[in-house]
Amino acid sequence: MAHFPFNIRASDGAARCGVLKTSRGDIQTPAFMPVGTAGTVKGLYMDQVKQAGSDIILGNTYHLMLRPGAERVKRLGGLHKFGGWSGPILTDSGGFQVWSLSKLRKMSEEGVEFQSHHDGSKHMLSPERSIEIQADLLGADISMQLDECTEFPSPYEAAAKSMELSLRWGQRSLAAFGERDNQTLFAIVQGSTFPELRRKSAESSVAEMTSGGYGGFAIGGLAVGEGHEAMCETLDVTVPYLPKERPRYLMGVGKPIDLVEAVYRGVDMFDCVIPTRSGRHGQVWTDKGPYNIKKAEFAEDESPLDISFSCPASNDYSKAYIHHLIRSGELLGAMLLSWHNIAYFQDLMARMRTEIANGSFESFVTRFRAGMK
Amino acid sequence: MAHFPFNIRASDGAARCGVLKTSRGDIQTPAFMPVGTAGTVKGLYMDQVKQAGSDIILGNTYHLMLRPGAERVKRLGGLHKFGGWSGPILTDSGGFQVWSLSKLRKMSEEGVEFQSHHDGSKHMLSPERSIEIQADLLGADISMQLDECTEFPSPYEAAAKSMELSLRWGQRSLAAFGERDNQTLFAIVQGSTFPELRRKSAESSVAEMTSGGYGGFAIGGLAVGEGHEAMCETLDVTVPYLPKERPRYLMGVGKPIDLVEAVYRGVDMFDCVIPTRSGRHGQVWTDKGPYNIKKAEFAEDESPLDISFSCPASNDYSKAYIHHLIRSGELLGAMLLSWHNIAYFQDLMARMRTEIANGSFESFVTRFRAGMK
């Protein structure tokens, strides 16, 4: 299979910054991927997503296969054309949303049968079908193996059994993916919070040589309620077993402090709905954590959200105005805060890349943990 | 009072095109004013509103006095600064929304007491308070007299009584407005669908010489259920009594065919929520009328909404994509259709101005009535 060239420009402790070179453009890492669930990053125009510093976005297989349908997206020219995003796209396998959103799941060795949360229609997701949807129909630059997101908490035996299933689904995903130009497939490491299981999952995925192995390695099954400490501990016992020369992707994470701690542990890629979802509810992200713009104290605050980076949503509107918009349920409030939060997350990634390149990341992490005072 | 210079560049039958020159910029007439209810044109960035061809927007006194509060807007620098719109703004008097939205109204000669539809809080709107809110606190370029929107249908006697009240409130509005630089006040003609009442209301408003009279004349009490024919007939018996040299504004109207017929009868200004409200529900406006993008026939239609004028929302997205966005309840669907519809309405106004200037408006109206085949 094609492996996108991944050039690590600098390292600082376990953290590294680099460039993943896809045929649709370079991805500066550590990278944050805004979530374009159903072919749109909620509330943003794609040029705002790009302008905020996003090199790659994520698309959700589960959502797109149900609506508008993967075959339909293919007939309309693929996901890039359909959604108006010409840069690289990573799609998830659909497994996580089947687990979190769908009704009446029926798991088997073959795959998972489920009912749409929209209309109750029945669907089947197998490793082969997931690859077909991602790589053939949506046309993702980076596809993910189908995995089972292990419930948290899980007893050891159940977590082991689930992880082993994901390994077998990974082998089938690799086989189905085969040889492709300009597209790659990432593995997903599972194993809950058990170090031995994480190690086995990582080592087995790395050792997988069918079709030349995986183009990158994701860490799944986190950000599912285990908490920040357990997440960090799980990274500590997982990342060391992943190859240095391939990108590492922590799925569905997270808050800014999660991103900083994960980069500190050697993670290169992230995706999360937090910037847009929390923005729609009035949350504003900063280095000191989030605050809600609806609070009375902002009713007459004429200062902008943030002038430390360049983004119209952050620079050109008063807190008082956005306070009013969110309190009034106005679309523009959700639009501005989603945009600001995406820009803040991307600025944070850019600052981390600079600190790593400068060899000053350790000090940055210390300051960030202390609220950047 | 200051009357903004109004230069009529060309006439064609009763229709005319001109420029109303305010200190915040020229308004090309016939003009369509997008409604910025609560300090935002729903779903659009102000630069999109401007770029679509809008010279002036409308703000709602009722909404703004309740949230964020008119005194608060004043402390925050006025409505232009608060909402990020540097062009002219016309505010309504609040009367219409009190009539259509509020609870427990209590009418008296003094004014109207009402309860907020948000929280039940009690408020008073008198001619003097309405002017204070519009001209002093919000800082509107064009304020409207307080009027009573006569219920439709109304018996003659009730319509007469209501119209007379609006006349007295108009006198008090004029007195409260006094002498102002760079701000003007418009009268509102009432009288339901009764020609004699419309004539009396118009003539009395025109004759009103307190403080130098009104800077423009609005026709109120239409688009309240009387229907297109009755609206046209009422214009036929009202517009002739309004002075040629002042702008005429048909409040709350309307659909494209209403705009065309009203311009044909000599109206210069309009406002309506139709482009944004119907856009949020999937309606796409065209010369042939509206259609709903949710219809199955658009599921795989790769053509853009409209390429006959320049607007990214109209030119750069496929119908299939917008169909998907609206069906999925995505913010971007509402954003794109609101933007397209505003741009379509403004393009229609621009075409009418050109046709009037060219002396070909009659033929344009004939073609428009026939669906522009």
Image (cartoon, coloured by chain):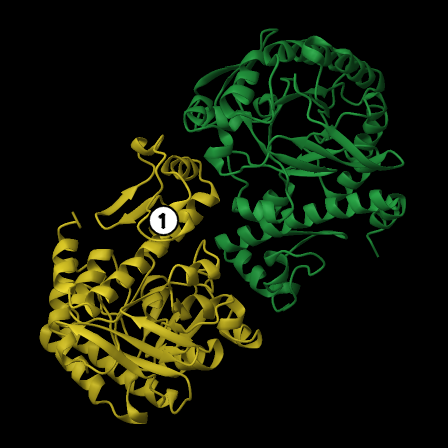
Chain colours: A yellow, B green
Pick the residue in front: B173 or A251: B173
Quarter of the figure with residue B172: top right
Kind of residue at disc 1: Gly
Nearer to us in this view, A206 or B137:
B137
Q: Is residue B160 left or right of residue A100?
A: right
Residue at screen point 11% across, 57% down: A366
Q: Which residue is mark 1?
A: A279
Under tag 1, what secondary structure? helix
Q: Mark 1 belongs to which subunit?
A: A
Q: Is residue B138 visible?
A: yes
Q: Residue at x 24, y 56 (%)?
A: A256
Q: Residues within 10 Å of mark 1 (few under 14, many from 20)?
A: many
Q: Quadrant of residue A105?
A: bottom left
Camera-side residue of B287 and A116: B287
The x and y percentages for residue B330 are 49, 55
Vertical order, B162 against B15 (above or below): above
Residue A68 at x, y percent in the picture: 52, 67
Residue A184 coordinates in the image, percent (x, y): 36, 83
Residue B186 shown left or right of residue B8 in the figure: left
